[in-house]
Image (tube, rainbow, N blue to C red):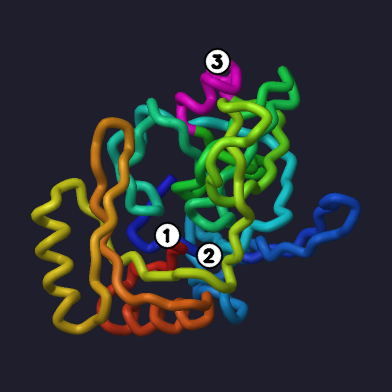
Amino acid sequence: MIFSSKNKYTHRFYRFLLVSGYTLLLVQGCFNLKKPPDRPAGYSKPYRVMGKWYQPIPYSKGFQQQGIASWYGKKFHGRKTSSGEIYNMYAVSAAHKTLPLGTYVRVHNLNNNKKLDVRINDRGPFVSGRVIDLSYMAAKKIGMAEAGTTPVKIMALGAPGGTSSQSKMAASYVPIDYYRGNFTIQVGAFSKRQNADKFKQKLDQKFKNAHITIGQTGDKKIYRVRVGKSRTLKQAVEYENILIQNGHPDAFVVAE
């Protein structure tokens, strides 16, 4: 969940995870520093919550994690998430500290064996031992709304790729390459189209490829204002830094 306007990235900790028979090194460290830690090349900017810095990882391929899931509801309902979307507790979504925003993950409730695919659109939970924060609806679907917390295993899936041939109801996913693809920079998100148009016109004067993408949160539309177009994550991060230096501290890279 979002705690400040500059909380989209930060915190670094190294841990080894066993994935499909091999060990994958992931950067997810935590530092109690006054200044942000140096970020590795290609990584998004860190963010700070309650005195700790968190460093998001640039890709999700092969990511697995086990720990405690929790859920968040009314206190954050209607507020902006870290992705710029408006949090809707009655929609299915989730928060994670370091996975790329937009990543789909499969959450496996180890208490009742229920599974649910959710999209990461927010940051959190910032409680020791907890690995994912579900929306109220996601928690209800996976059978943990009453308990509040439950042990889970999460696995990154990628981007939706339609439905599988085995079942019309089962979604298939395509792994996301976060180093190469179509990247742009999100600079703002608005609930009113006229505000998004006005901001886009302002960006048009200084930056190339200013455009608006329309998303949906429940029954409400969200208008995301983005600029630039890059083929690699490295190029996108360089463009992100230019935007930050030009008065847009909340700019962040997204894959389109």
Residue 212 on image: x %, y %: 24, 60
| Badge 3 element | loop
In this picture, which residue range is highlighted in magenta?
A: 135-148
Residue 204 seen from this side: yes
Give the x, y percent position of residue 221. 24, 42
Within-10-Å neighbours for mark 2: few <14, some 14–19, many 20+: many
Circle 1 is placed at which residue position?
Answer: 7
| Whole-number angstrom distance, CA of label 3 to CA of label 1 | 29 Å
Q: For this view, does 198 lie left or right of residue 244?
A: left
Queried whether the magenta region covers residue 234, the answer comes back as no
Mark 2 and mark 1 residues within 8 Å of each other at the beta carbon: yes
| Dot 1 crowding, Cα within 10 Å, few <14, some 14–19, many 20+ | some
Name, please, the residue furthest toward the top. 146
Residue 80 is situated, as x and y percent measured from the top left of the image, at 31, 47
Secondary structure of the residue carrying numbered label 1: loop
Question: Disc 2 designates what residue?
Answer: 10
Which residue appears at 41% of the width and 29% of the height?
A: 73
- Going by the numbered disc 1, the residue's amino acid type is Asn
Residue farthest front in this picture:
165
Instruction: Please tell me which residue lies in front, 97 or 109.
Output: 109
Query: Which residue ends up furthest to the right in the rendered image?
Result: 21
The disc, 2 or 3, on the residue closer to the chain's N-terminal end is 2
The residue under the point 68% across, 57% down is 61
Q: Nearer the viewer, residue 59 or 139?
A: 59
Q: Is residue 140 magenta?
A: yes
- Work out whether mark 3 precedes mark 1 in sequence or the reverse, and give the earlier one: 1
- Residue under label 3: 146
